Amino acid sequence: MEISLKATDSVNEKTTTEKKRIAVLGSTGSIGTQTLDVIAEYPERFEATLLVAGTKVDTLIQQALRVRPAMAIIADESKYWKLKDALEPVGIKTAAGQQAINDAMELPCFDTVVTATVGYSGLAPTLRAIEAGKDIALANKETLVVAGELVTAALRGGKSRMLPVDSEHSAIYQCLVGEDPSRVRRLIITASGGPFRTLPANKLETVTVHDALHHPNWSMGAKITIDSATMVNKAFEIIEARWLFDMAPEKITAVVHPQSIVHSMVEFVDGSVKAQLGVPDMRLPIRYALGDACRLATADSPLTLDRMTTLTFEEPDESRFPGITLGRYALEKGGTTACVINAANEVAVAAFLRERIGFTDIHRLITLALEKMPFVATPTLSDYINLNSLTRKFTEENII
């Protein structure tokens, strides 16, 4: 059953254009909740008019009753009636299911969509939003990891803009303002190194889920925290940077920066380097994206001198964290390679979080999928959908 709503249905379309109207996909997650914090911080600039969540219906109801969007959608169709009973009596329209989410991207009640969902689920609604001419504040890196060529082609053919929300890509974006892209020598993406940066390699097989979720600097959702621990997230960020900034793969590198104060850097052909620094708080890049690169004043605590007295950088140890090599491999081979990596990683991380496999099994399962899955050099959307499904099934079957 799909409880859907067509774009032609009435959804309290706003007649004024004074405020930016925002759809938040993944409103109950870490980025989504911080996005709602930013929207509430600037009520004269922004309003949330569409909220979308996966399974956390109680949190979605609380958010909707607080911000009063035109509509709220839950991906889990079994939660629909609870959502409807709570919200429709107060005038908030409701729907459920993935098709409803995709269709909602064409609704006239919002101008910008923050894609804060986790994983592959962000691809289809992002493509629909681009088709509808919506601006994209991209926090779902997997959209470009899985189908970067397809997404960027859609952007070139339409009027949508894509602004990065990931702290690393927001930093690069800020460093490139006013610069000639042809004068860039390297994009340098920083990585905290995660919780196991100094752990001996022979200890990685026995780390626990609790250990892996204990990130030293950032407060994030479980999946992205594990990706940080394996450094697969850096592989994904290398791929994302290639598509966001139309940069040759060999011009993108990563360095470990344990303090997470320098969010990324750009090196130019004259030898100069520009860096963006800030406290490790995702609300900073969210503000920058929603404000269309305008620096909005905030009462949040700024970066202080004492936090900048020691800033260190080191090469990532790829022998201990082979996940970081996956980004370069995917860009070199192209086609459906990154789609397979992402699908296998999502299944493997979910299995690790349920304590079905060990930490190092995540990379083992990704490698196995890359060896066994078919390769499509010039994929269509159907190819991505098919390979995603096939890889997930294969990886699940190989969890032992």
Image (cartoon, rainbow, N blue to C red):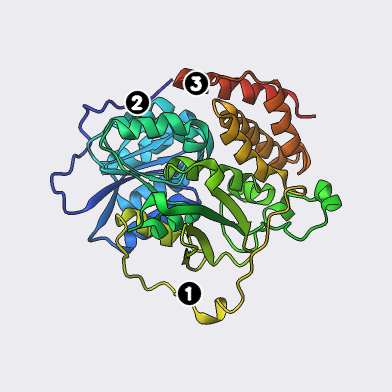
**Callout 1: SS:** loop
**N-term-proximal mark, 2 vs 1:** 2
Disc 3 designates what residue? 378
> In front here: 30 or 191?
191
**N-term-proximal mark, 1 vs 3:** 1
* Disc nearest the viewer among 2 and 1: 1
Q: Is residue 75 visible?
A: no
Q: Which percent across, then down, holds residue 255? A: 62, 57
Residue furthest toward the left?
Answer: 15
* Disc nearest the viewer among 3 and 2: 3
- Residue drawn at x 45%, y 53% is 184
Disc 2 designates what residue? 4
Q: Is residue 32 visible?
A: yes
Residue furthest toward the front?
Answer: 270
Q: Which percent across, then down, holds residue 329? A: 63, 36
**N-term-proximal mark, 3 vs 2:** 2
**Callout 2: SS:** loop
Tell me the distance, in whole angstroms, between the alpha carbons under discs 3 and 2: 33 Å
Asked if marks 3 and 2 touch (Cβ < 8 Å), the reply is no
Describe residue 382's horizontal placement relative to residue 194 as left or right.
left
On the rendered image, what quadrant is the N terminus found in?
A: top left
> In front here: 199 or 257?
257
> In front here: 238 or 115?
238
